[in-house]
Amino acid sequence: MNKKVAFYTLGCKLNYSETSTIGRLFNKAGFDTVDFADTPDVFVINTCSVTDNADKKCKKIVKEALKISPNAYVTIVGCYAQLKPQEIAEIPGVDMVLGAAEKFNIVEHIADLTKKPKTLVYNQPVSEANQFIASYSFGDNRTRTFLKVQDGCDYSCTFCTIPLARGASRSDTVESVLEQARAIAASGVKEIVLTGVNIGDYGIRDGKREHKFFDLVKALDEVDGIDRIRISSIEPNLLTDEIIEFVAVSKRFAPHFHIPLQSGSNKILSLMRRRYKRELYADRVAKIKQLMPDCCIGVDVIVGFPGETREDFVETYNFLNELNISYLHVFTYSERENTLAAEMTGTVPGSTRSERSKMLHILSDKKRRAFYESQLGKHVEILFERDITDGYMHGFSRNYVKVKAKYDPILVNELKTVQLTAISSDGDVEITETEETLVH
């Protein structure tokens, strides 16, 4: 009987793509992938370390894993494992910690699953994580696949530990990405989400730039069998006019951009060492909306950064309120070791950070509702997913409007044209279900 392995992933789409790839390595080695609660022999926890909360979640997951399967072999990988391996090694029940350069050799490291008296730690300097390992998510009940095209980051934002956790910017080749995209298409998946740490910086191989992200975009647009391709997140200074103009007329790229802002105050952007000012960000949004009025635009923003006064926050709030955007991802600043921001003066009290976060979450709800209302009455194509809640299933339009419909198994992973009719009490969009709109 094969040994069983279960996975738990914290953090970003990039982590999900890598977890799925690690899962395939286990499958090739004769392991069966099972649900977390199905008493596995091995737990693999892929961690994030963007916020303190992610670190705390890791400890809780280890504790829950050992309740389910007390004798299981517990391995921790991911950004937290690279940054604080010894801290993880002290968590009761952890058997192995693998850093960024070692995680894809996990099967060889685990070997015979013999638990040792002391936690094994394999953690080389992040400079050793200099190879690009191709990854994509697959087979986890998703109708979308997260395809990793880039890893690492050469930027030096003062709040961020990702360069310390993942190393320098590096990318897959265009040929390799296209090969994976064709394989994904052949599997029946209809949507690919391009992911990485800084995908706009795509094209660096062995420290030298071989391509631009735009080269990859043009090449992927020609891959048959994929209906939609999304750009997961791209820095505003790397979102060029040529990319925006191409997406506007693309056969496959979705009219949906997620563009990190972090602050609407140029003073705070400078303290963060971001590579743009708010004026450039506003220009990018205006350019998108000029060419794609129905485009969905998501925004990352951090509240409570050191030195952020009430006036700075109000400047950010007003800037976002006036922008023609669709939703916000709000992050409350948390101090991270070995970052310049952690040493800065002007610490914002925790209660003030929470208050500002709440205000922006309310603004996000307002923006999303306004965007959804602007789409009502339109006939759009929805890709339905395999999730069921209280007898309903969900799907997304090309421009990322989330809709709900009564569960029908024949709709799973199907593209159907529907009419957006109303916004439900839970914030999703309801659709007209007629023979003309939902053709089975």
Image (spheres, helix red, strand yellow):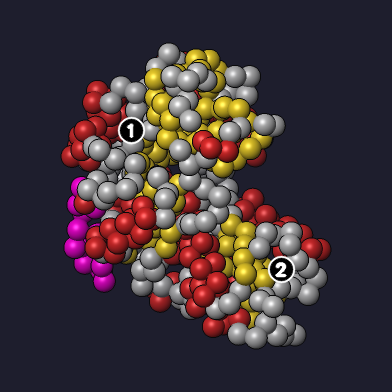
Residue drawn at point x = 40 percent, y = 29 percent: 381
Numbered circle sitting on residue 38 = none
Q: Does the magenta run of residues contain 59?
A: no
Q: Position of residue 165 (x, y in %)?
A: 48, 64
Residue beneath the point at 50% across and 15% down: 421
Q: Nearer the viewer, residue 393 or 102?
A: 393
Q: Secondary structure at mark 1?
A: loop
Is residue 210 part of the magenta span, yes or no?
yes
Q: According to the image, label 2 marks what residue?
A: 40
The part of the image, by quadrant, that contains residue 77 is bottom right
Res 259 seen here: no
* 48 to 355, vertically: above or below: below
Position of residue 47 in the picture relative to residue 379 (left or right): right
| Quarter of the figure with the N terminus | bottom right
**Residue toward you, 245 or 264:** 245
Vertical comparison of 18 with 401: above or below: below
Check disc 1 and report the residue beneath it.
255
Highlighted magenta segment, given as a residue range: 203-218
The percent position of residue 45, horizontal first and vertical second, equals 62, 64
